[in-house]
Image: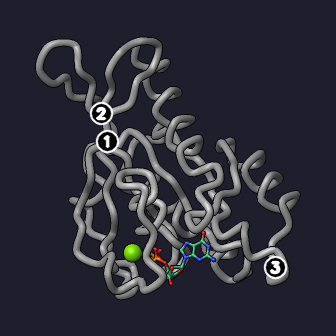
Amino acid sequence: FYSEDSGDDYLFKIVLLGDSGVGKSNLLARFARNEFYSNSKSTIGVEFQTQKMEINGKEVKAQVWDTAGQERFRAVTSAYYRGAVGALVVYDISRRQTFDSVGRWLHELHTHCDMNVVTILVGNKKDLKDAREVSTADGKSLAESETLFFTETSALDSSNVNAAFQTIVKEIYNILS
Ligand code: GDP
Ligand code: MG
């Protein structure tokens, strides 16, 4: 279920899922490097990034995988999901269609991974207030009905990005310890 690195380090594989353009690569860039790219092309090609975190005084490594654009061709491979213990299922609060796809991504996830994979539903681009098409209440209620954690983030202004990853990693750690 998890791999133990050297000594008492933990390494958790976490996957990013969601339609193309919702901001997956930028959530990872913000989390791992505190960077943001207004042009999405610059984020293509990164397979995964490993970020050290401290949970209850222990060092934990989050190995976060990015689809690197595979989802555009509906070709997210089973290798991508293999060994994942956490997932962020991301939609864009300014594009309803990306929220409507969440069910499909959850289905994909549960086809490839254990049902117990710790999952957070993430409504990204919350900075786009005037363009909002998905209410916070709708996000929350979907998360409740699917028993997922829930947050709204902005990779652009950084809000809730670290907290989203922290929530997942903490829960994985709690389950495993
Ligand atoms: P991906 O296809 O899911 O990996 O999405 P990207 O990370 O490539 O982002 C797609 C586009 O949305 C890019 O132009 C980003 O600059 C933009 N974007 C990503 N996150 C945010 C955000 O939180 N707010 C805003 N306003 N734009 C964002
Ligand atoms: Mg991407």
Q: Name the residue at 40% across, 23% down.
A: 54
Taking the image as shown, residue 145 lies to the left or right of residue 49, namely: right
Say whether disc 3 or disc 2 marks the residue closer to the N-terminus. 2
Taking the image as shown, residue 173 lies to the left or right of residue 104, namely: left
- Corner quadrant of residue 42: bottom left
* Picture coordinates of residue 169, whole percent (x, y): 46, 33
Q: Nearer the viewer, residue 85 or 93?
A: 93
| Label 1 residue SS | strand
Of the numbered discs in the image, which one, if any, rests on residue 67? none
* Picture coordinates of residue 27, whole percent (x, y): 48, 61
Q: Is residue 84 above or below residue 98?
A: above
The CA span between labels 3 and 2 is: 35 Å
Badge 2, how many Cα within 10 Å: few under 14, some, many 20+?
many
Give the residue pinned by disc 2. Answer: 61
* Picture coordinates of residue 47, whole percent (x, y): 22, 63
Badge 3, how many Cα within 10 Å: few under 14, some, many 20+?
some
The CA span between labels 1 and 3 is: 32 Å
Q: Name the residue at 35% across, 87% down.
A: 73
Of the numbered discs in the image, which one, if any, rests on residue 133? 3
Total marks in image: 3
| Label 3 residue SS | loop
Q: Which three-letter amino acid code belongs to the residue tagged 3?
A: Glu
Q: Is residue 23 above or below residue 64?
A: below
Give the residue pinned by disc 1. Answer: 51
Asked if disc 1 and disc 2 are in contact, CB closer than 8 Å, the reply is: yes
